[in-house]
Image (tube, helix red, strand yellow):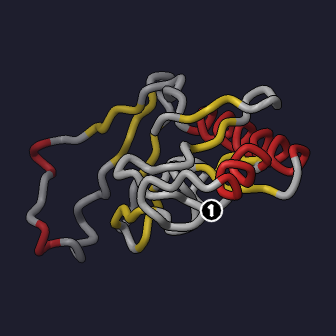
Amino acid sequence: MQALKTEAPGIVRPDRLNYAGWCIWCGERYCTKARCVKMHVESIWGPCSVCGGSQMLDVKGADELCGICIGGLTQYDSVEDAVEQERRETEARRRLARHLSVVPEPVYVVSDPSRWRPAADHDRSDVPAPSVRSASGQVFYAGF
């Protein structure tokens, strides 16, 4: 969605008319009301606190559109509130990026084909559980 830059760095606002030409303030098509234009110019927008600006929500494992925001943006009461929300979202993305980074030490599954067993034999105690070996040689056993 095209967005207009506002005075605050990093803060944007959605278009007053959506792509179909409907006004986000009064709901009229091709609106030219001075009141709507003035409200839009004076409005303060920032990333949505519900979806984080992605416009998508994970609801029971399925992606659904966020019903709170317009193009990932929500109206705020002040520039400070919008900047604070942007700061929180940026920090959350950084934390998430750290967790999604590449594992420094790859893990390999070690198995002995002669010891494989059918899934139905999961209660057999004479067959050891599969193990996982890290690149440094440390072995982890997976119990059932």
- The spot of residue 85 in percent (x, y) is 78, 48
Q: Secondary structure at mark 1?
A: loop
Residue 48 seen in the current view: no
Q: In front here: 108 or 54?
A: 54
Quick one: label 1, few (<14), some, or many (20+) residues within 10 Å?
A: some
Left or right, 131 with respect to 137, comes to left
The residue identified by callout 1 is 50
- The spot of residue 77 in percent (x, y) is 85, 58
Quadrant housing residue 97 = top right
- The residue drawn where x is 14% and y is 72% is 121
- The residue drawn where x is 45% and y is 30% is 134
- The residue drawn where x is 18% and y is 41% is 112
Quadrant housing residue 84 = top right
Q: In front here: 57 or 126?
A: 57
Mark 1 belongs to which amino acid? Val
- The spot of residue 119 in percent (x, y) is 13, 68
Is 121 situated above or below 98? below
